[in-house]
Every structure is written in structure tokens, then in C-alpha cells.
Image (cartoon, grey):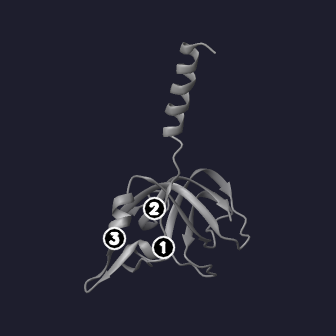
Amino acid sequence: MNDRRAMGVLFFCLFFSAGAQAADTITFSEFYLETVRGLKFSPKLTALAGKTVTVVGAMAPPLRASGHFLVLTKDPVSLCPYCQSDADWPADILVVYLKKETVFIQKNRPLAVTGILEIGSHTDPETGFVSQVRLVNASYQEQ
């Protein structure tokens, strides 16, 4: 292989390996800190805002058989954990906006969900659903 071609291969490998870094991970217990005034975002959650992260949890019962979003919970639940305002927002759920519409099949197995972390109160314009912590442009894998 000549020098020019070797340099091209090296550049290609360096360029594409930089974009293929593994996502940071965060657990539900790392989302918030308890204070005398209630819960506040943890330093780790705040530092990861806008970055690609992975969270492992259980899919809450979906509102529909298919859609672009799901709710991830720390532990499996059988009731609607997200039928509340953000003032009553449970500390152990995460809204996930998927890259593409998905047909949901609950297999009661943990999911590893990877997406871009967003924090702060947000009302979904389509559903009226209010969230504090979200993953957007996300995908998931069964564990």
C-alpha cells in the first residue's frame, strides 16, 4: 500500500471512530437529588443534558399499540405512572421519543434505551403529556 493510500485509510478510521463513541450511562437513581425543597436535577443529569445516554429500565404500559414514544420506568409497573402533571412527576420514570414509530410488544424484559437527553418541563404538543426528563431520537434493545 502506498503512503497516500495508507494516510487515507488512517484518516477514515480516525474520523469515523470519533463519532462512534459509546453513550454515557445514567440510572434512575442518578436523576435527582433530594433537598429540603424537594427533588432537583442531579449534577450528573445536568452535565449529560444534550448528550447521548443509555438508560436501562422497564417499559410502562403503552397508551397505544404503536407510536413514537414510550415511558421507561425504574421497575415494571401495571398502572399508568404518567397520568399526572409535572408537579406530581414521579422520580423514577423517563419519557422516550423514538426515532421511528414502533409497534409495542411488552415482554416484561428490561430495555436499554439510548437517545439524546433533554431536561426541564416540556408539554408534548400532540398528546399534552408533560415530562421533566426525556430521551429524544432514541432507540432501544431488549436486555
Among the 4 quarters of the image, the one containing residue 71: bottom right
Q: Which residue is mark 3?
A: 41
Q: Which residue is mark 1?
A: 28
Q: Position of residue 15 (x, y in %)?
A: 49, 32
Q: Secondary structure at mark 1?
A: helix
Q: Secondary structure at mark 2?
A: strand
Give me the disc on residue 134.
2
Q: Nearer the viewer, residue 130 or 117?
A: 117
Could you give the CA–CA distance between mark 3 and mark 1, rounded to whole angstroms?
11 Å
**Which residue is at 50% across, 40% downward?**
19
Q: Position of residue 77 (x, y in %)?
A: 61, 80
**Residue type at the position of mark 1:** Phe
Give me the disc on residue 57.
none
Q: Nearer the viewer, residue 86 or 54?
A: 54
**Residue type at the position of mark 2:** Arg
Could you give the CA–CA distance between mark 2 and mark 1, rounded to whole angstroms?
12 Å
